[in-house]
Amino acid sequence: MTQLAQNLLLGLLLGGVYALAAGGLTLIFGVMRVINIAQGAFLIFAAFITYSVWQVLGIDPLLAIVITTPVIFSIGWVTYKGIVAPIRTAPIASTVLLTFGLALVLEAVMGMVWGNNSTAIRPGYGNESFTFAGLYLPKAQVYGGLVAILVLVTLGLMLTKTWLGRAIRAAAANPAGAELVGIKVAAVAALVFALGIAAAGAGGAIVGVLYPFVPGAHYQWIARLLAIVVLGGMGSLNGAILGALMFGVAETLTAAYIAPSWATAVPYAIVFLVLLIRPQGLLGSRLREDAVAA
Amino acid sequence: MRKSTRAFSRRPSWSRVLVAIAAVLLLTFPLISDDAYYQNMIILSLVFAVGASGLNIITGFAGYVSLGQGAFIGLGGYTVGVLATRFESVSPWLWVPVAGLVTAAVAIGLGLVSLRSRGPSFVIITVAFLFLVQVIAVNWVAVTNGTAGLTLPLPSWDSDVINWPFYYALVAILAVQLLMTWWIRRTKLGMGLIAIREDETKAATIGINLPVQKIIGFTASTVFVGMAGGVYGYYLTFIDPRGMFSILISVQIILSLLIGGKATLWGPVLGAFLIEPLNEIANNSLGGGNMRLLLFGGLLVLVVIFLPQGILPTIETLLYRRRTAGKAGLVGARIGSGGSLKSWADRVEPAEREASGRALLEVAGLTKHFGGIKAVDDCSLAVADGSITGLIGPNGSGKTTVFNLIDNTVRPDAGEITFDGERIERLTSWDRAHRGIGRTFQTTRLFGEMTVLENVVAAQRSFSWSQLGRIAVSGREAKAAEELLEFVGMRAYRDQKAHALSYGQQKLVELAQILMLDPKLILLDEPAGGINPVLIERMAEMFKELNSYGKTLLIVEHNMPFVLDLCDPIHVLARGTRMASGTPAQIQADPAVIEAYLGEDFQFEPEGVR
C-alpha cells in the first residue's frame, strides 16, 4: 500500500513536469494551429544549456531555470520570427514538416556542441531522499515536481489574470475579432510561440536533473508530449495537465509493476484506446469548422 | 479549340520520353554495370521510391501528413525476418506478400483509431506509432530477438548476380505501386481523397464517406511499402529495431515526396532518386551522424518554405505559363447557353408544377446556439414535395445555419429533422446526401485544385465499394457530369481548375456538382448573390426546369423579385425562428414581415424578372 502511494506520488510529480512541456505545446497549437514537433528538441536543448550553466557557473540546476528560461524564450521568439512566421497561414501539414525539420537541425546542433554521449546533471542532493510516513521520495524528483508546479501555476495565472493572457485567449478564440479590438495577433503569436517553448525549456531543465539525456532523446519526448496533448484534447491547457498527470502515473506504475522496458509503450496504448472511444480527447471539444461564412 | 489538359494522366510527350529512358536505364543497369556501390544505391532508392509513392496517396492526395511511413518499411522487414527465421525451409520470398498484408492490417487498425475524426490527431498518432513499434520490436524478445536483431538466411543464388533478385523485385513492386497510384487518381476514390484534402466539410456534403475513404487511402499507401520493406529486410540480411524503425527513414521518405512533388505520379520517384544519393554523400563524405541530420533537417525546412510545390509541379507551372503566354484565357469566355437534361427525361417522371402537399422535408423545434447567440431558436418549417420554397429573412436571422443543420455541416442542439419520412438528424452529411439532399454554399466551396469535371464527378450519390474503384474522369461518370455541365452552360470549362473560375461560374459548377447526387431536395444558399442579371435570369430558368423534373428546391435569397417570382410558398425567418409563411402575395402584405425585413417602401415590380 505504501509502495503504491509512493509510486502514485512519484507519478504525479513526474506528471507535473510533463504538464509543463505539454502545456507549452498545447498553448502553441491552441493559439496558432501549429503542431510544434520541435518541442521535444527544445526541451533537451534546455537540459543541455542547464548542464552548461551548472558546470560553468556552479549554480543549482533547478535555480538556473531563472537564467535558462529567458534564454530559451529568446531562442523561441527568434525561431518564430525567422522561420515559422513566413508560413504561419499555411496548412497544418506544412508547419508540422517545418518544425520537424527544425527538430532535426536542433538535434544535429546539440550533437555538435555537446556530443552524442549521455549527459547527466547531478546536484549535491542527487542521491538523497526524503523519508516521510514510510514513503521514500528522491529529493530531485520532489524539488523538480514542485518547481514544475510553481512554473505551471505562474503560467496559468498569467493566462487568466493578466491583459496579455486575455489577449492570448482572444487571439486563440477568434483572431479576426481580436485584431478588431486592437490586439496585434501577429505579435501575440510570436509571444505565444516563445512562451510555449520557454515552458518546454523549464521542463527540460528539470528533466535534465532527473534523468541522463542525449540529443536523440527528443524523439521520445515529442512522442510523449504529443500523446499527452491528444489524450487531453488538442489545444486544451487543462486537458494537457490532466493528460500529463495520467501519463506520469501510468508510466511510473508500468515501470514499477509490469516492466521498466515497457514503461514507454503502455501509455501509447492508453492513448490509442482513448482515441478509439473518444476521438476528441478527454477535455477537447470536437473541432468542427463552422460553415457560416457570413 | 485546343484542350489544355493538365490532368495527371496526360502529360506532354517529351516527359513520356524521359520516363521511358529512365525506365530502360533502370531495367538494364545491373546488366551494364556490376558496381555494387551503385547497385546498392539504386536498391535503396527503389525502397524509398515505393515508400514516398505510397505516402503520396494519404499525404499528397488526401492531405493527411504521416510521419510514421518508415515504420511500415520496418514492419514489412520484420514480418519477413521473423517468418524467415522461423520457417527456414521456406524461401523468404514467400513472406513478402504476407508483409504487405500485415502492414495493410496494421494501417486499417491505425486508421480506425486516428482517421475517424478529422484534423491533426492523425499526424500525432503516426509519430506515437513509430515509437510504439520500435519499443515493441525492442521488448518483444521472444519474437523479434530484441536489440540483438535477426539474421535472415543468406541468399542461395549465384553470388555474381547476388543483387539481381532484390533489384528486380523492387522494380516490380515500384511498378505496381505506380500503377495503383495512377489508377486511384482516376477513380471515384481518388476524387474523394483529393476532395477531402481541399475541403473536408464540403466533401462530406456531396456524399463522400470520410472515414471509409481516408482509411482505404491510408491502407493503400502502406501495402506495397510493407512489401518493399520485406524485400529490403531480406536484402540487408540483418535487421534490428534501431535500423528498421529509425525515424530518419520516415524523414527521407517525406523529403523525397516533398522535393519531387506531392500529388504527382512521378514526383515521389524523382525525389527518392535525388535524396538517396545525397544521403550516401552525407554518410560517406561528410561523416554521417550529425551532418546527415543537419542536411535532412535543413533541407526539410528550406523545402517547406521555398519549394512547397516540389520540383515537378513547379516545372509544370512554368511550362504551362510559357505555353499559354499571350493567349486569351478561357475564363473570360461566355457561358454556354445551356443544354437540356436529355437522359433525365427517361429517368424522372416530369412532375406537375403543383406541389403534392406531402412534406419532403420537415424540421421541428430546431435549435442551435453559438455561445450566447441563438442562431436558430426553436425553428419549425416544412418543404412540400415538388415545391420551390423560399426562405427569406434579415441578415443573421439564421437562414444559413438552418441549411447547415439540414446537411449536418453543424450539429443541432435540439430538434428533429424529417426527410422523406425518415428522421435524419443523427445521420452524417454523406448519409443525408445519399438520401437525396444536395446543398450549395453561399460562398461557393468548390475544390480549387481540381478541374471543373473532377469537381462534378467527385460527388457520390450512394456508397458502394465497387463505386469507389470506378474510373471517374472518363466513361459513364464523366459523360453524366458533362451533361450536367452542359445544362448549366459550363461544359467548355471542363478542364479548367475550379479556382480559376469567376464567382458566378463557380456557382454554376457547384450546382452541376450537387445535381450529380440526383438529389430529391436541392438547398440553394443565395444562388443569385453577386452574379450578373443575365445569369440570374438563366438561374431562374434552370431552377424551373429542375423543378419540372420533380426536384424540390429550398432557396435562401435576398433578391426579392427573384424570390417572389420563383418561390411559393415562402418562409420568413427572424431571430432564428419562423415568423411567417405564405404565398408571395401574402408575404408582401404581411405587416410583420414588412416591419422586420422588407421595409415600408418595398414595392415588388413583376417586370424585374420576366
Image (cartoon, helix red, strand yellow):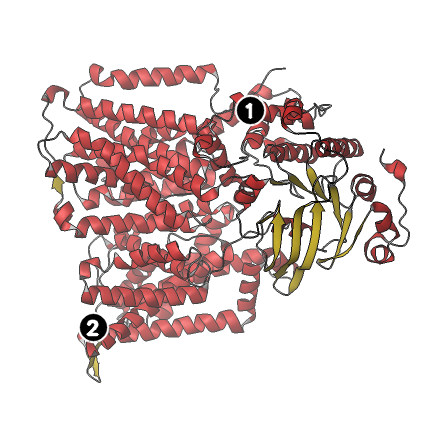
Q: What number is the disc on residue B126?
A: none
Identify the chain of the residue marked 1, using the numbered disc in the image: B
- Three-letter code, disc 1: Ala
Report the residue at 26% width, 33% height from top. Answer: B227
Q: Is residue A153 above or below residue A264?
A: below
Toward the viewer: B560 or B278? B560
Where disc 2 sits, the SS reads helix
Report the residue at 43% width, 41% height from top. Answer: B212
- Three-letter code, disc 2: Gly
Horizontally, residue B544 falls left or right of residue B201, namely right
Report the residue at 51% width, 45% height from top. Answer: A90
Q: Quadrant of residue B324?
A: top right
Q: Give percent across and percent down for residue B260.
A: 40, 31
Toward the viewer: B189 or B547? B547
Check disc 2 and report the residue beneath it: A126
Q: Give percent across and percent down for residue B248.
A: 29, 42
Horizontally, residue B317 falls left or right of residue B24, namely right
Q: Give percent across and percent down for residue A58.
A: 26, 71
